[in-house]
Image (cartoon, rainbow, N blue to C red):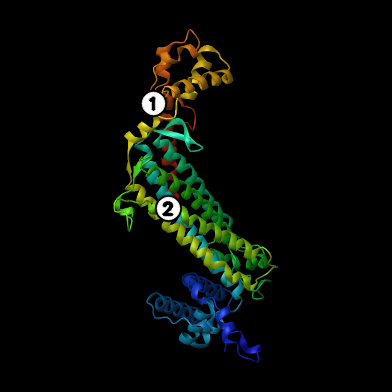
Amino acid sequence: MKLWGTRFAKSQSELLELFNASIDFDKTLYKQDIKGSKAHALGLFKIKILTKEELDCITSGLDVIQKEIEEGNFTFKLAHEDIHMSIETRLTELIGEVGKKLHTARSRNDQVALDFSLYCNEENINLQHLILELITTLTNIASLHTSTLMPGMTHLQHAQPISFGFHMMAWVASLKKDYLRFKSALERNDECPLGSAALAGSVYGNDRDFVAKTLGYKRASMNAMESVSSRDFALDLDYAIAVLMMHISRMAEELILWSSYEFKFVTFSDEYSTGSSIMPQKKNPDVAELLRGKSGRTFGNLMALLTILKGLPLAYNKDMQEDKEGVFDSVETAKISLLILDASLKTLSIHKENMLAMCQKGHLNATDLADFLVKTHGIAFRDAHHIVGRCVLRAESLGLDLSKIDLHELKDLLPSDVDLKALKETLDLKACMERRDTLGGTASSQTALQIDEINSWLRCEQDSKKTL
């Protein structure tokens, strides 16, 4: 008989049993369910529902069940529906009548909310650690390339000279925001739903704050009905993962472009490349392509959860059984994505000479020519813009880049008293990059400051995690 089945005159149909069960996927939560049950049992002992002997008996039985599951000796049965009833049924088999006391003062409604909340918070922390590792790798790469020239682009067209280190720190800036997004989600959802029972709280006088602290939460949830109804902790995690994967996808897109023969800025190691079944010369950036593609599934998982929840009345509804698989998938997708991106970046070859050669195309110093005219001749920027536009046309008619043209070819387009020597020094590509020496700029000194700032921040974050 089902644990809830005494009010039913007929047995459940096999089709409903199959349709209703969630054990195939929510068994992922076995550790969280056992952890929550131990804390709940301790709470029951505190309010004298359980004796010390009964508490010890339940705790020992739960330990046996965890060992059985982890050693592959636990039989999950469809008839038990979910991880909660599977563990409770097995506990009663092991320790007898005492096992039936464990569900006092709780419901599967607050039990599943607890298990899923614990899972989301634990995986949030795991993802935070992986993001910090990726930030560390990127910052280390940046520190080696604060003066390595590459073309900065807008609209995927050559724009201005930047350093490769500066570009890496742009990626870091995005990942730092991702990390802080996970961190704030954890703080926002650091509350324990256990003790909310079905929707209205318990009649047993549970000490919910005690149980919350026992489980490592900062606080118990404020409202029992909201607690069993809410999956904000899962939505926040799904959203943080989706934004993280969007950033990773953008990084992957640039790596794919840079690894092509048209750019040849970087080369993936053989360890993180694949070949073609027909074209023997191919070396494909499949890691980056998969990273770009996997963002889509995390976006879908977020939208699916929002759609599941959008029309539900308070409190618990069975629709919420559909909340877990997408989150499990997004978590595992994000974890392996962070790991393989970090590993592939550590083994990436960076071709500075090809980046420099590409800087000599597309007139990257054109803006600097306009700025030179503004600063040395007091010309309004819009007029200087027009002058430089004509200089670009002249260079292109000669088949040259502004970085390569003899400035005498432009003399008739420029003010008559222009100092060509000073202009030549100004238009040096390295000088153009170094001149952007304002906060957040690409100058090597500014990139170094960004690296120092991130390294200091990393030390603080890593030290704070050691004390948790």
List x then y, in percent, for residue 333. Answer: 46, 59
Mark 2: secondary structure: helix
Check the image and name the residue furthest to the bottom.
Answer: 9
- Residue 125 at least partly seen: yes
| Residue lying furthest front | 397
Q: Are marks 2 and 1 in contact (CB under 8 Å)?
A: no
Asked if residue 36 lies left or right of residue 142, the reply is right
Query: What amino acid type is highlighted by mark number 2?
Result: Glu
Q: Residue at x 58, y 71 (%)?
A: 321
- Give whichever of 335, 154 is nearer the camera: 154
> Dot 2 corresponds to which residue?
289
Q: Position of residue 76 (x, y in %)?
A: 46, 81
Q: Quadrant of the C terminus?
A: bottom left
| Element type at mark 1 | helix
Report the front residue among 217 and 263: 263
| Mark number, residue 466 | none
Q: Nearer the viewer, mark 2 or mark 1?
A: 2
The N terminus: image quadrant: bottom right
- Residue 430's disc number: 1
Mark 2 surroundings: few (<14), some (14-19) or many (≥20) residues within 10 A: some
Looking at marks 2 and 1 on the same chain, the residue that comes earlier in the sequence is marked by: 2
Residue drawn 43% across the image and 36% down it: 166
At 50% from the left and 10% from the top, the residue drawn is: 415
Q: Quadrant of residue 14?
A: bottom right
Q: Note whether 85 is above or below 269 in the view shown.
A: below
Residue 71 picture quarter: bottom left
Q: Could you say which is closer to the camera, residue 134 or residue 117? A: 134
**In the image, is residue 227 above or below residue 244?**
below
Query: Could you tell me the amino acid type at mark 1?
Result: Lys
Tell me if mark 1 has few (under 14), some (14-19) or many (20+) residues whose alpha carbon lies within 10 angstroms of its own. many
Q: Is residue 170 left or right of residue 107?
A: left
